[in-house]
Image (cartoon, rainbow, N blue to C red):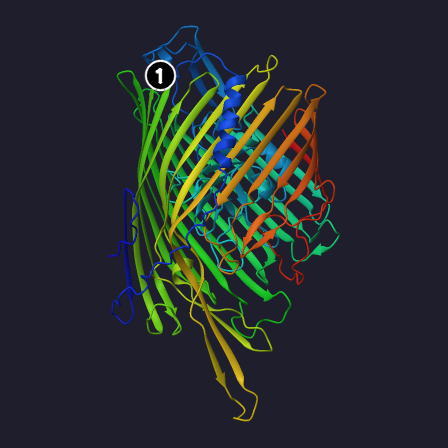
């Protein structure tokens, strides 16, 4: 049993078993890698200053009377296909001393009750947490080809943009890869990973099949927790997305064409309801070629050949019970990591819900899921494979299955309204490889149990959550003789276990009908993955010259990453601000985190072997032996920043923005075992437009502003500014035509957090896509 964590956490435990030939050697990797002392120069706290200035300006400009809150706070859900939420408010003044008793909504018949329906797009502005969402409209405008542009427009959220790999790698607050962000499709964890000069994991989903994207930044206590920095859930199309209101059947089709290599993309979906059964199905096809950057240079191996589909079945057993089955299928061919690749992803789910109207103590949900993601390597992209560590015919497969159950009970404790959620979730990954190279095989299990309870009294809402995580990892690995642990070379069986108790507490107050400040304290843990712990093998060796023997080593002594931190934020939601019927929505937060034991790539021992294969007087053979492995950076790193997003809409005109400031002391994540993950210090998106012809015709522009990005080792990537144009016209109630021009001024740039394309020898070539036209026709009937 090891107990390496000495911080003031609620509880954490680690156990490790490293057994060669039945013996359990001592843990040799105990010398902490302490980060260098911080320099004595001071840094202006721009984050808190920006947030305070914004809140002060709003308080002065929008002041109005306070009132008591009536309903439980809305929350972002990982369930697919959720309808708009209803929030009920009591428009009564706040008393000077004691808040008014909270009455059940159904029992109140006074005319002071105001019921407001909140759309999915507006839900984050009523949630006291750093959450964001993107709906179908935004995806169809900016994300029919790649979802990166949609996710990067959210505050505090970014992606590792691979030019060759079509997968999605979500970055939250500078944390990326290896499970630091729990990425899901319809609430199902996507844990497929491989090791290379890339993100430490991708999620594969067709943008044309996505109905919405939900992002939660920071620790998550409920379903989807167990990650360090937050969650990202991709909700796929379902019955209610396809069938128009008032109909029992319908179809949804989209036909898209793009210039600059994008080509044609088609999607067709159909759904029907009959009695207690409803079904939906969809299929999509996209064949893309290489694109050109703003200088007209072709970026090689950036195409794909994608076909995907889904199916959903819902059975309403009773008006209060529903049983659902679903599948999401993905099949793509592309060139990445220097090889032709085929990627297949199959997801299967079964869901059950039971919410009796007469019993507020039961709101039960359960999900059972199975995933199978397989990556098959074909030929080396040049046709001439490396002489050592050839990846031809490599297979990496991750089979995962899991379940989660939860129940929300709602009741009263005197004048206090209580909503308490208990839940359990489990997920198991079985990773197998053939000719895996540095990609190991192994198994991992995650078990989580949690409670999150909200106490509502007058204007106050106190949410207290506690999550228990238990993680285990086992597998076999090979350790080379040149290693930093003092262990003999050989095969080792690894069996590690980790656990933690992660608390989260939020206090929110609806101080006026339009202003809701909140404060949150949270802790979370990320356990080391199979890929980090069991990695072994050689780097491909070039032909000719001194041989570079780069040997990758496992690290069975890795310890979990921990974070604890605070978040201070506020929400603004106000109608009729400057004119009757307009709406202002604003959300902002300042966060500060302390991160311990951050895992990065580390250089191990090196050696030089000199031999004379042609005799003593012949030319010598020189072998340079270097090693690399994943290691903990012991000590504390500080991460802080500001996140803001807002929307103003008059009906005929609209404008929105998002802004992110980030500062981090995290150790540099090298671009060998993963990729650098520092966010730009500042980045923002500004959108504006008008609606004409009874709001049937929309015309708008979007600007993206990105500051320079720290690449580590004293290098920076230049910042850039981009402009996009978009318009769409509602020809008929069922037919919409759209045009989007990406990179309107054909700017040559390299996106922040981007990976160079396979086969691109000149690393100074800009990787950003040049001007691209997207035409779309969407029909729903």
Residue 371's place in the image compared with 301, above or below, is above
Which quarter of the figure is the C terminus placed in?
top right
Count of marks, rendered view: 1
Residue situated in front as seen by the camera: 427 or 327: 427
Residue situated in front as seen by the camera: 73 or 59: 59
Residue drawn where x is 49% and y is 62% of the image: 395
Residue 688's place in the image compared with 297, above or below, is above
Residue drawn where x is 55% and y is 53% of the image: 711
Estimate how packed mark 1 is, as few (under 14), some (14 to 19) or many (20 or more) residues with alpha carbons within 10 Å.
Answer: many
Residue 98: x %, y % from top left? 31, 12
Residue assigned mark 1: 458
Image quadrant assignment for residue 22: bottom left
Would residue 349 be seen by someone viewing this image from the given angle?
A: yes
Residue 430: x %, y % from top left? 39, 56
Residue drawn where x is 24% and y is 57% of the image: 1
Would residue 246 be seen by someone viewing this image from the given angle?
A: no
Residue 232's place in the image compared with 651, above or below, is below
Residue 123's place in the image compared with 157, above or below, is above
Element under disc 1: loop
């Amino acid at each position: 049993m090891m107990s390496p964590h000495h911080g003031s956490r609620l509880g954490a435990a680690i156990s490790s078993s490293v057994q060669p030939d039945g013996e359990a050697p001592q843990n040799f990797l105990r010398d902490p890698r302490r980060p260098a002392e911080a320099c004595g120069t001071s840094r202006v706290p721009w984050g808190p200053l920006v947030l305070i200035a914004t809140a002060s300006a709003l308080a002065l400009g929008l002041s109005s009377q306070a009132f008591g809150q009536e309903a439980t706070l809305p929350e972002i859900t990982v369930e697919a296909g959720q309808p708009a939420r209803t929030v009920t408010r009591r428009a009564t003044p706040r008393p000077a001393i004691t808040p008014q008793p909270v009455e059940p909504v159904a029992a109140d018949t006074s005319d002071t009750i105001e019921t407001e329906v909140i759309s999915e797009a507006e839900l984050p502005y009523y949630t006291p947490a750093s959450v964001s969402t993107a709906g179908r409209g935004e995806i169809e405008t900016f994300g029919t080809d790649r979802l990166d542009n949609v996710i990067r427009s959210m505050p505090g959220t970014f992606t590792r943009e691979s030019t060759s790999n079509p997968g999605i790698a979500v970055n939250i607050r500078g944390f990326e890869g290896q499970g630091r962000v729990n990425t899901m499709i319809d609430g199902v964890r996507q844990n497929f990973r491989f090791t290379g000069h890339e993100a430490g994991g991708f999620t594969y989903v067709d943008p044309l099949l996505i109905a919405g994207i939900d992002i939660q930044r920071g620790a998550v206590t409920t379903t989807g927790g167990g990650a360090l920095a937050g969650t990202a859930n991709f909700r796929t199309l379902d019955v209610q997305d396809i069938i128009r209101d008032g109909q029992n059947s319908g179809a949804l089709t989209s036909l898209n064409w793009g210039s600059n290599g994008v080509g044609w993309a088609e999607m067709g979906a159909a759904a029907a309801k009959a009695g207690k059964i409803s079904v939906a199905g969809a299929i999509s096809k996209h064949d893309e070629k290489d694109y050109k950057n703003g200088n007209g240079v072709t970026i090689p191996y950036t195409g794909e050949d994608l076909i995907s589909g889904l199916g959903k079945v819902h059975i309403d057993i009773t008006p209060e019970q529903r049983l659902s089955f679903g599948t999401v299928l993905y099949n793509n061919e592309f060139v990445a990591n220097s090889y032709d690749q085929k990627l297949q992803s199959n997801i299967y789910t079964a869901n059950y819900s039971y919410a009796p109207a007469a019993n507020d103590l039961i709101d039960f949900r359960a999900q059972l899921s199975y995933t199978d993601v397989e990556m098959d390597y074909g030929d080396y992209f040049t046709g001439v494979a490396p002489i050592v560590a050839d990846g031809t015919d490599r297979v990496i497969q991750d089979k995962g299955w899991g379940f989660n159950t939860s129940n929300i009970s709602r009741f009263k404790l005197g004048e206090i309204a209580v909503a308490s959620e208990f839940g359990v979730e489990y997920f198991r990954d079985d990773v197998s490889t053939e000719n895996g190279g540095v990609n190991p095989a192994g198994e991992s299990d995650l078990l989580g149990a949690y409670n999150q309870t909200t106490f509502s009294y007058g204007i106050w809402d106190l949410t207290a959550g506690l999550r228990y995580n238990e993680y285990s990892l086992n597998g076999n690995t090979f350790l080379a003789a040149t290693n930093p642990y003092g262990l003999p070379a050989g095969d080792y069986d690894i069996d590690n276990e980790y656990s933690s108790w992660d608390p989260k507490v939020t206090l929110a107050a609806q101080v006026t009908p339009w202003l809701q400040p909140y404060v949150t304290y949270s802790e979370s843990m990320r356990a080391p993955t199979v890929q980090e712990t069991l990695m072994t093998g050689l780097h491909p060796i070039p032909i000719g010259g001194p041989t570079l023997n780069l040997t990758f080593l496992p690290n069975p002594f890795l310890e979990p990453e921990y974070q604890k931190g605070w978040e201070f934020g506020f929400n603004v939601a106000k109608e009729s601000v400057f004119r009757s019927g307009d709406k202002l929505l604003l959300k902002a937060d300042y966060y500060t985190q302390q991160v311990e034991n951050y895992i990065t790539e580390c250089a191990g021992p090196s050696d030089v072997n000199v031999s004379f294969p042609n005799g003593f007087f012949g030319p010598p053979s020189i072998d340079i032996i270097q090693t690399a492995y994943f290691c903990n950076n012991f000590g504390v790193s500080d991460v802080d920043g500001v996140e803001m997003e807002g929307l103003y809409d008059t009906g005929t005109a609209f404008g929105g923005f998002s802004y992110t400031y980030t500062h981090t002391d995290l150790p540099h994540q090298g671009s060998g075992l993963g990729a650098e993950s520092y966010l730009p210090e500042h980045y923002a998106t500004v959108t504006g437009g008008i609606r004409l012809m009874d709001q049937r015709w929309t015309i708008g522009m979007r600007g993206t502003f990105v500051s320079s990005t720290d690449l580590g080792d004293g290098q920076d990537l230049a910042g850039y500014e981009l402009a996009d144009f978009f318009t769409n016209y509602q020809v008929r109630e069922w037919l919409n035509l759209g045009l989007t021009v990406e990179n309107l001024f054909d700017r040559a740039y390299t996106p922040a957090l981007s990976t160079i394309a396979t086969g691109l020898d000149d690393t100074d070539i800009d990787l950003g896509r040049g001007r691209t036209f997207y035409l779309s026709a969407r029909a729903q009937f």
